[in-house]
Image (cartoon, rainbow, N blue to C red):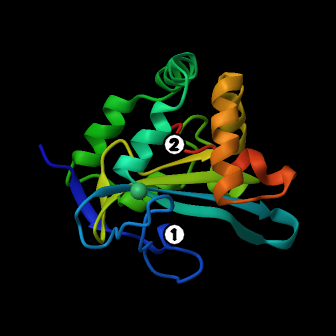
């Protein structure tokens, strides 16, 4: 069965252009012509006292580059993360809901942490992920939102080897200051 599709919502747009991402972060191939599926990941921080939210990072990775990065993760890291997620998320019922034409607005899927159900407004940090094709967002087990505490829990399950791989990816493409570095996890979830 083909996944349902919706137009990519603005929350998944490239911050710089305020339009959908044009190319893969790594290989720079065009993403809008529909020759490949791709994954979008964005990280946000909010400052409740000021009612302000900022985008910390955002990128799109074509499936091929995504797979390459994913394969660089150690088996131990993958198994630990998958165990954590399957323990906390009912992916089957999530997917069934996303396939259901009568299901809630897909935007609802990125309003609270997929692990802890914490509403977005109560999270100081969170990341959102989506699986896209051309101008469409595909409803698979994504999109999802994951909050800071659940991200921390995942990071704790990564091996040193995997953390090094992610560190290399981060340094090469983002160059974030140290206090923000934990925000970029790469495709741990997708
Ligand atoms: Zn690529």
- Viewer-side residue, 168 vs 183: 168
> What residue do we see at 35% from left, 48% from top?
64
Percent coordinates x, y for residue 78 in the rendering? 51, 23
Closest to the observer, 87 or 172: 172
Whole-percent x, y for residue 69 in the image: 49, 40
Which of 26/144 is in front?
26
Q: Secondary structure at mark 1?
A: helix
Res 143 label: none
First reached walking from the N terminus: tag 2 or tag 1: 1
Q: Which of the labelled discs sits on residue 187, or is there none?
A: 2
Mark number for residue 11?
1
- Where residue 179 appears, x then y in whole percent? 86, 51
The total number of labels drawn is 2
CA gap, disc 2 and disc 1:
18 Å
Classify residue 22 as left or right of residue 175: left
Q: Secondary structure at mark 2?
A: loop
Which of labels 2 and 1 is toward the front?
2
Question: Which residue is at 51% across, 27% downward?
Answer: 85
Residue 128 in sight from this viewpoint: yes
Quarter holding the N terminus is top left
Vertical order, 52 against 116 (above or below) = below
Quadrant housing the C terminus: top left
Q: Is residue 37 left or right of residue 18?
A: left
Position of 119 relative to 20 (above/below): above
């Amino acid at each position: 069965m083909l996944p349902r599709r919706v137009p990519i919502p603005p929350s998944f747009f490239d911050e710089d252009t305020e339009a959908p991402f044009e190319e893969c972060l790594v290989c720079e191939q065009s993403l809008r012509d529909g020759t490949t599926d791709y994954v979008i990941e964005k990280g946000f921080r909010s400052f409740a006292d000021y009612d302000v939210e900022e985008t910390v990072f955002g990128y799109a990775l074509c499936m091929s580059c995504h797979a390459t990065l994913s394969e660089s993760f150690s088996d131990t890291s993958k198994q630990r993360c998958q165990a954590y997620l399957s323990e906390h998320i009912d992916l089957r019922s999530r997917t069934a809901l996303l396939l259901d034409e009568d299901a809630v607005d897909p935007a609802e899927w990125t309003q609270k942490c997929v692990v802890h159900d914490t509403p977005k407004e109560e999270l100081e940090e969170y990341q959102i992920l989506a699986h896209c094709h051309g101008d469409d967002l595909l409803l698979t087990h994504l999109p999802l939102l994951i909050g800071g505490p659940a991200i921390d829990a995942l990071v704790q399950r990564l091996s040193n080897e995997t953390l090094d791989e992610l560190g290399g990816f981060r340094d090469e493409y983002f160059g974030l200051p140290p206090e923000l570095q934990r925000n970029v996890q790469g495709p741990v979830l997708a």
